[in-house]
Amino acid sequence: MNEMDKEVVTRFEKTFNDVNVQFGQTFVKMFGGGRARLELTDPNNLLTTGIEIMAEPPGKKLQSMRLLSGGERALTAITLLFAILQVQPVPFCILDEAEAALDPANTGRFASYLSQFQTDTQFIVITHRKETMVQADRLYGITMQESGVSKLVSVDLSQVSASN
């Protein structure tokens, strides 16, 4: 057990540090400035510690994520996800209206940032936001042309742009 605990601590510490660096860098890009970091709630015991997300959007003071506005919290959480994906890419990621609380400018920033991962990660994004849809390669929708009959509609945006 001691050997496993040591391995867990070693891996956690490395991953935490790598994600923390990426989080700080990604935050600046997503927010157009500011700073952010992750803090351990109990740095002396990595097996039981929690993680506190600290963020300072441009024009604000450094504070716990819990004290940010809804849109700032959403963008900070998205930023943390992007930082994790930079450290440990995954083949696909499903996001269900992740940008719903964002204003149009931040939604556009979020959507354009998705393309930076296209070589490693395929995103399936459920959204109603135009700013996100215009960044997609393909759109799927459900329409109901007659009561009780749903129909799948698909548009390959790369084909639409190529034909224009």
Image (cartoon, rainbow, N blue to C red):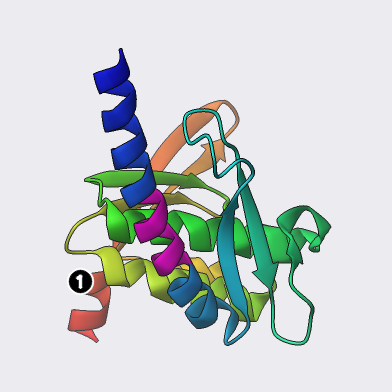
- Counting the numbered discs, the total is 1
- Crowding around mark 1 (Cα neighbors within 10 Å: few <14, some 14 to 19, many 20+) is few
Res 6 → quadrant? top left
Q: Nearer the viewer, residue 93 or 28?
A: 28
- Residue position marked by numbered label 1 in the rendering: 159
Measured as percent of width and height from the top left, residue 16 is found at 41, 50
Q: Which segment did they paint magenta?
A: 15-23
Measured as percent of width and height from the top left, residue 119 is found at 17, 63
Magenta-drawn stretch contains 113: no
Q: Is residue 63 visible?
A: yes
Image position of 63 (left or right of 90): right
| Kind of residue at badge 1 | Gln
Relative to 35, is 19 above or below?
A: above
Task: Report the quarter where the C terminus lies.
Answer: bottom left
Measured as percent of width and height from the top left, residue 27 is found at 53, 73
Q: Residue at x 63, y 55 (%)?
A: 53
Secondary structure state at the residue bearing disc 1 = helix
Task: Report the quarter where the N terminus lies.
Answer: top left
Q: Residue at x 21, y 45 (%)?
A: 91
Measured as percent of width and height from the top left, residue 152 is found at 38, 41
Res 62 → quadrant? bottom right
Q: Residue at x 54, y 28 (%)?
A: 48
Query: Farthest residue toward the top?
Result: 1
Image position of 55 (left or right of 68): left
Image position of 138 (left or right of 106): left
Relative to 102, is 64 above or below?
A: above
Relative to 141, is 7 above or below?
A: above
Q: Nearer the viewer, residue 29 or 138?
A: 29
Magenta-drawn stretch contains 20: yes
